[in-house]
Amino acid sequence: MRTHQPLACAQLRGAAAAPVRRGAEGDAACRALLAALALNGLARSDAELYLRANCDLRERGPVSIDIDQRGGGRLALDPLSLADADALLDAALAAAEQKAGVQWNGVVLRVTGNPSIVAGAVADEGEGQD
């Protein structure tokens, strides 16, 4: 699996778009890549309940996703898993590389937590009870 790197802001504003091949297929591939990147970010955001320090959230039920349709209808969808979001981003990137000459370059930031902090964590009294 490819390591995903964020696009630089200048790339999104078009400053690095000169080598990108134009045309209907290339434009569609670039739009699909941006959509896949957004969906990947949403899936990662939805996978985490941490809002800010000392603000622990608890879900009341399973995640539900509804899309409003014409005529007052709704379409229920399953949430996008991280694995599916990564696969979608991989496919969109491969298509954009082939059809539009997009190059995915940048710095990868890896953060490793301190295991002693995790080992010292304890559940709050009454946690898990309603």
Image (spheres, rainbow, N blue to C red):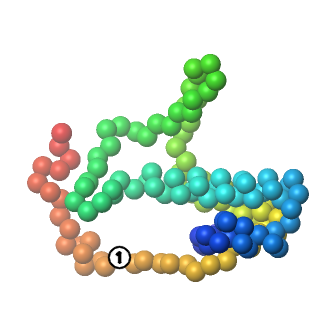
Above or below: residue 116 compared with residue 27: below
Above or below: residue 36 compared with residue 20: above
Q: Residue at x 65, y 53 (%)?
A: 35
- Name the quadrant of the N terminus: bottom right
- The single residue placed furthest to the left in the displayed view is 125
Q: Is residue 125 left or right of residue 110?
A: left
10 Å crowding of disc 1: few (<14), some (14-19), many (20+): few
Q: Residue 93's spot in the image, x, y percent?
A: 72, 63
Q: Is residue 121 left or right of residue 73?
A: left
Answer whether residue 70 is visible to the viewer in this image: yes
- The single residue placed furthest to the right in the displayed view is 23
Seen from the viewer's position, the closer of residues 8 and 25 is: 8
Residue at the spot of label 1: 113
Q: Is residue 36 left or right of residue 102?
A: left
Q: Residue 27's spot in the image, x, y percent?
A: 81, 56
Seen from the viewer's position, the closer of residues 15 and 108 is: 15
- Name the quadrant of the C terminus: top left
Three-letter amino acid code at disc 1? Gly
Q: Secondary structure at mark 1?
A: loop
Q: Residue 33's spot in the image, x, y percent?
A: 70, 58
Seen from the viewer's position, the closer of residues 21 and 127 is: 21
How many labels, in total?
1
Q: Quadrant of residue 2?
A: bottom right
Above or below: residue 11 compared with residue 127: below
Answer whether residue 2 is visible to the viewer in this image: no
Q: Residue 80's spot in the image, x, y percent?
A: 55, 48
Q: Residue at x 30, y 77 (%)?
A: 115
Seen from the viewer's position, the closer of residues 125 and 5 is: 5
Q: Residue at x 30, y 60 (%)?
A: 52
